[in-house]
Amino acid sequence: MSYKLILEAISYAARSHDGQTRADGHTPYIAHPFRVMTILSVVFGVTDPLILATAILHDSIEDTHVNYDDLKSHFGEEVADNVARLSKDMRLPKSQREFEFLQDFEGASFAVKLCKLGDMLDNITDIESIDEAKLQSIVAKAKSVLETLESGKPLHTGKVSVAIEAVKSELRDVSEK
């Protein structure tokens, strides 16, 4: 595996999210997966191409026409499994899908947890494109994910500690605004 996997994932995600915009109605949606991958690389220090590919593809199943089998055939089982673990079952009522996601997240892999923390950090820092109600929802979800991470079995890794502290810091900043 090399940087070619990441480049392929970037192109694939860009095609998959084509035409979508963020909540502001102007920013191309693909900016979010790019930022999540950048957070993992620059802020959390991740260099693993499989994790970075997961980051760029993290919303592909949940928010596009892409399914698990598509990802598996293009990027392999590990990336497809990670992205599936980061995807909520949109067929369920919102409260149930959030509950089930958090239940499943507790046993998720290192890669999935790092990607979710990067996703949360980007969503929290992208407050210009969201209203107050959406921000409060994002903050509540971030706190739930952090609680799940901190109450589960400890992950003895500096990257997760850095990621958790970055999210906590941003949550404090948002709460002070």
Image (cartoon, rainbow, N blue to C red):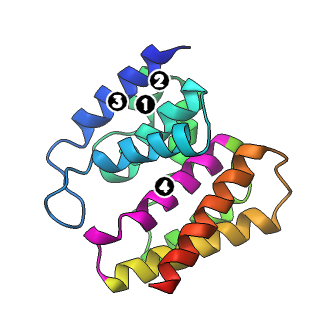
- When the figure is inspected, residue 125 is found, relative to residue 14, above or below; the finding is below
For marks 3 and 2, give the one nearer the viewer. Answer: 3
Residue drawn at x 56%, y 28% is 50
Does dot 3 land on a helix, a strand or a loop? helix
Q: Could you tell which of marks 4 and 1 lies nearer the N-terminus?
A: 1
Label 2: which residue?
75
117 in magenta: yes
Q: Can see residue 148?
A: yes
- In the image: residue 38, left or right of residue 19: right
Instruction: Specify the quadrant of the image occupied by residue 125.
Output: bottom left
The CA distance from mark 4 to mark 1 is 19 Å
Label 1: which residue?
71
- When the figure is inspected, residue 170 is found, relative to residue 86, above or below; the finding is below
Label 3: which residue?
10
How crowded pointer 1 is (Cα within 10 Å; few <14, some 14-19, many 20+) is rated as many
Residue type of the residue flagged with mark 3: Ile
State which region is magenta: 111-131
Residue type of the residue flagged with mark 2: Phe
For marks 4 and 2, give the one nearer the viewer. Answer: 4
Does dot 4 land on a helix, a strand or a loop? helix
